[in-house]
Amino acid sequence: MNFEEHAAKPVLRAHGIDTPRGEVVRDATAAAEIAKLLGPCVVKAQVATGKRGKAGGIKLAANPDEAEGHARAILGLTINGLKVEKLLIEEQKPIARELYAAILNDAESQRPLLLFSAEGGIDIEELADERPESIQKIAIDIRKGLDQGVAVVEIARSMPEHATAIADVLGKLYDAYRASDAELIEINPLIVTKDGDLVALDCKLVMDDGAVPRQGELAPKGTPDSVTGLEERAKEHSLKFIELDGEVGVLANGAGLTMTTMDAIRHFGGTPANFLEIGGDSYTKAKPGLELVLANPKVKALLVNFCGAFARTDVMAEGVVKAWQELKPDIPIVFTIHGTGEDEAITMVRQELGVEPHDLMNDAVKAAVEAARSGSASQ
């Protein structure tokens, strides 16, 4: 779950990180009224996405009239597919230096990862590509928390004069990360003011969806991801389905195998049309799952990749075969099947659908990609 800036900043304040004063408004007249109280201010679009400034969604205002004009221009903008319906009017702060700080879930270290850079206020992805050495990284042991001594030493490499104060803010940022069950909490920029204070000018917060039930106070302030009509239908069947802009439909058991299959499709020059997590219960959910995939008119071929251990592939394959026979789609279907019950599953697919499953996953992926291009599968 994503949080707009105005909803994320109270999480920082609750843990002792300073942020500018500001108010949320929904019309230009209210923006001017708040500007009268704050003085020189910033008018900020409130949508749960990045690069708002590049899209014209963040403007400096020297007085209430400018604030009102910027508000009229920004309200109604569409930024990364999200319509701006409210604004954060926030006091300006005297900036001496801009920094970057974030904590995120890191799959490689299997720990929270602290990122810090003395170069904030810019596109961090570009910075990582062009000057990766400018981003300092500290993997955090969740049993001990952020080691302040280590943080001070690391930060002193680029910001010796503020290392202790910055390390203190980063410790508070980690506390906020833990308390909010965050997947990511980011401050860009974290500024050093001309008076030497540290202030978070922005905040991005992404909460683990699995934590929503226990975050009773915070979760209602979040912005659920927008979903397509097909994704909404998937929820009715308790299926984890994400609609993508590709031509190869994917049915695989388990999230890991599905992601691997999608990566392989891209590797061989195709694009996946969906993510659909369907596991051992695919016998009962094969039909609604298949209907979701086929409802996307861009799908030109279907790739079925089953790998069974405890879940039997013949049971999974039976669900898909029956659904295919009932729905009678007019596109090529390609199979690759391995694991428990694979002999029975392969025989079933061969006899019931007249399709020969591929021994190797790569061969099946190549066939599906080619089928989507030509409209006929290579058996």
Image (cartoon, rainbow, N blue to C red):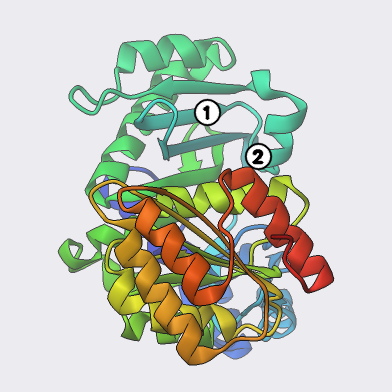
* Residue pictured at 33% horizontal, 70% vertical: 282
- Closest to the observer: 250 or 174? 250
* 10 Å crowding of disc 1: few (<14), some (14-19), many (20+): many
Q: Nearer the viewer, residue 329 or 175?
A: 329
At a point 73% along the width and 24% down the height, the residue shown is 131
Q: What's the residue type where badge 2 is placed? A: Ile
Q: Is residue 11 left or right of residue 205?
A: left
In the displayed structure image, the side of residue 2 where residue 35 appears, left or right: right
Image label count:
2
Left or right: where 22 falls relative to 176 = right
Residue 373 image-quadrant placement: bottom right
Foreground of the two, 37 or 209: 209
Quadrant of the rendering where the N terminus is positioned:
bottom left
Task: Give the image location of residue 378, x and y in percent.
Answer: 74, 61
Left or right of residue 63, residue 34 in this image: left
Of the numbered discs 2 and 1, the one sitting upstream in the chain is 1
Q: Which mark is residue 116?
A: 1
Which image quadrant for residue 318?
bottom left
Residue 97 coordinates in the image, percent (x, y): 64, 32
Q: Is residue 30 above or below residue 257?
A: below
Q: Is residue 222 visible?
A: no
| Residue 234, x across and y down, in percent | 40, 81
**Amino acid marked by disc 1:** Phe
> Residue 124 shows which numbered tag?
2
Alpha-carbon span between mark 2 and mark 1? 10 Å
